[in-house]
Amino acid sequence: MDHYDEDQDYRHPEDDWDRDLLLDPAWEKQQRKTFTAWCNSHLRKAGTQIENIEEDFRDGLKLMLLLEVISGERLAKPERGKMRVHKISNVNKALNFIASKGVKLVSIGAEEIVDGNAKMTLGMIWTIILRFAIQDISVEETSAKEGLLLWCQRKTAPYKNVNIQNFHISWKDGLGFCALIHRHRPELIDYAKLRKDDPMTNLNTAFDVAEKYLDIPKMLDAEDIVGTARPDEKAIMTYVSSFYHAFSGAQKAETAANRICKVLAVNQENEQLMEDYEKLASDLLEWIRRTIPWLENRMPENTMQAMQQKLEDFRDYRRLHKPPKVQEKCQLEINFNTLQTKLRLSNRPAFMPSEGKMVSDINNAWGGLEGAEKGYEEWLLNEIRRLERLDHLAEKFRQKAAIHEAWTEGTAPSTPGRGGWQTTFSDLATPSLSPGKEEMLQRRDYETATLSEIKALLKKHEAFESDLAAHQDRVEQIAAIAQELNELDYYDSPSVNARCQRICDQWDALGALSQKRSEALQRTEKLLETIDQLYLEFAKRAAPFNNWMEGAMEDLQDSFIVHTIEEIQGLSTAHEQFKATLPEADKERQAILGIHNEIAKIVQTYHVNMAGSNPYTTINPQEVNAKWDKVRQLVPLRDQSLIEEHARQQNNERLRRQFANQANVIGPWIQTKMEEIGRISIEMHGTLEDQLTHLRQYEKSIINYKPKIDQLEGDHQLIQAALIFDNKHTNYTMEHIRVGWEQLLTTIARTINEIENQILTRDAKGISQEQLNEFRASFNHFDRKRTGIMDAEDFKTCLISMGYNLGENEFSRIMSVVDPNRMGVVTFQGFIDFMSRETADTDTADQVMASFKILAGDKNYILADELRRELPPDQAEYCIARMAPYSGPDGVPGALDYMSFSTALYGESDL
């Protein structure tokens, strides 16, 4: 039975007292002893006590005294008379005082107390105990009886053989009382020696120790508890409440320890975030430091293969190595902003990275990387174009030089294959005159020749000079090509120059010898008259025609390099024009052969004694026909080369249009998305969660667009592989698209991070959605440029409009809070932090210092053992490692200064 349940407004219902006769005598006995001891524990403070609970309170005097002691207040002056009316008056004063404390007394009157009604008296005392000893107990949002029970359960939880579920049978074995004592004062009881099957020893041990060391009177008898099937709940509650109040100081220490743990946990988390930022920033800066010299290296290679390998390495860098670093840079900025937000929310100073590792430093280093990267790619493409031009010129030089050298040596030139001449310039012999032309020009055959032979020699020399003049253009072309190779810094220029110098020397020597022989023949011409005009005419017509055929063969075998369809069409048109001249050339060939046939006919008809072949030329009909056949064979080969190149240029044009069609869609799409994100970050409709959901969906739609970027990258690689250097169909380059895409991803990630930080600020500061909307409206009003940030003057105008009276020093202080990076602008996140800072309920250095003072027992220092006893191991060691030794006059060995430590947590320090 529960006659005095505190859940009934501390009432003693009349119907309960009608059942008093049913009260277990054992319970009544326990209540008498417990309540009497409880009253005496307070009355002794006033120098008195009671012996009989129902008799000693009848006159109301000790009852009023008890209430004054436990409440700390003065009651009305008692009546000192011995009459019944005086006693009733005193008891009524006590009952009225109890009622003034919010306690409803039902069926308890002063007459019953004055008459010595034991049940009413016990009920009144229980009501007093509930109100003054139990009601104010509060544990984790529970109070009174439930709070006291929860406190017992929390304190005895570590003891496996104790299970507190109520205030009666859970305490019969005495281990619950011993566990409470051992938990707070382990030196008073050797808990390990207690046995659950020996309740008498357990109970007496607890009662004796509590009375002797804790100043808790013995309110219960072990025999009564063990001998009763269910001990009286109120007696147990009364006795246990004495333990709660005795150990309330320890409860305060636990609360203080929890506060310190919370503060230290925040500090440790922030320190880890700072270390993570420093490491990530160092790694990123180191990567940039290693990469920039590689991108700035402009040492050219000598071959196309080597330069193309450099281009492939650069593509791998853009495709494989750089994208993860872009993500790291974005994550670094997000981590920095999150850390600063957490520091502001926990009332900590802003985080200042090590010198050279600010976000602005990272951005500056990244800008240097981007600049080096852009210049490197442009240099690579220019070098490839230069080497391509050099290879073409070098091949052309080899062909022309070989043809000229074959002519000067008097032998037929080698026909170059598609891959070019197999010899290099350095393989050639030391410069010397060709023995063919030199030997011919140095003959002195005219000294013994007849007149006709002399005239023949003269005409032959005239034909040679005509041939020599025809080769002048080729020599000049060879010299011009060599000069261009030198100007383009061709790696094998020394060999080119040596070969060119040899050809020029040969040419000058031949000119000099030709001039000398001509003068000799002219001197002898007066002596010689006869000459065969037909041979002369053959020689004159055959020499230019032969030179034309050699030039035609040279042109038909000449390599070409084009970049557009228009260029290849120009070559094709020129080739068609050349083919149109072939019928006329064939007529000339037939005419030349007709001259030779006429000579043969004259010789045969007139039996002319001719010594040898045509004295005016070395060209014969067989050679003319052979070269003509060679020209006819080269024409279709030239046709095929032009057709193949035309097809290649058509494919290049298709690649240009394919890339342009996609780039002209993707470029404007990225620009549109950037503008939309800018509007979203300023306008922001709905709750922060709605905005965050909308932005994440927006981010997902952007990420889903990545395959189109990848497809465009593939088309760009095809264009680069085809060595296409321009595209008239679009103004967008792949670099524009890459930069725009990276900026788009970074912008949406930053915007989402800002909303997350706003949610974190709102939840930590208790800001309502309406307040956030007002903050946003105020911010947008003074963000006149609609950039999502306010400059210092706009922010100052905003503060003045809200009633702030700002001097320069005060405004500088506020700006240092909202703009810790000294950028000269205020973000919306910084604006929210400032607006909510005034009402924020955050931990302060004084609160932490007061908590340490509780743990230290009001001392000005604290010991390591006290920290290890009250704090978790890791946080206790954290404090011990960072607290300075205490230097005050009241210090002891090992004393630690918790005051300077608490101040350092909230000030400028290395924590």
Image (cartoon, rainbow, N blue to C red):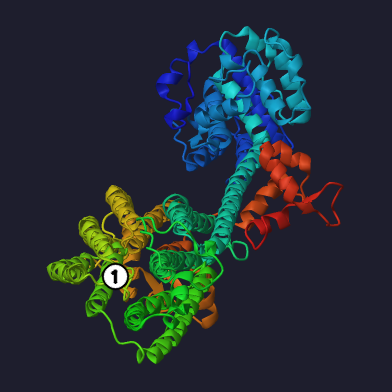
Residue 346 visible in the displayed image: yes
Residue at label 1?
551
What amino acid does circle 1 point to?
Answer: Gly
Q: State the residue at coordinates (44%, 27%).
A: 107
Q: Is residue 814 visible to the viewer in this orientation of the structure?
A: no
Q: What residue do we see at 48% from left, 39% from top?
A: 99
- On the image, the x and y values in percent for residue 838 come to 48, 64
On screen, residue 209 versus residue 620, left or right, reads right
Decide which of 810, 713 is in the foreground and name it. 713
For residue 879, side relative to residue 466 (left or right): right
x and y percentages locating residue 843 in the rendered image: 57, 54
Vertical order, 379 against 456 (above or below): above
| 351 left or right of 806 in image | right
Which of 331 and 261 lies nearest the eye of the viewer? 331
Screen quadrant of the C terminus: bottom right
614 is higher (above) or lower (below) than 187: below
Please state the horizontal and vertical placement of residue 267, each as a whole percent of the image: 60, 50
Q: Quadrant of residue 167?
A: top right
Residue 310 shown left or right of residue 71 in the figure = left
- Nearer to the camera, 92 or 816: 816
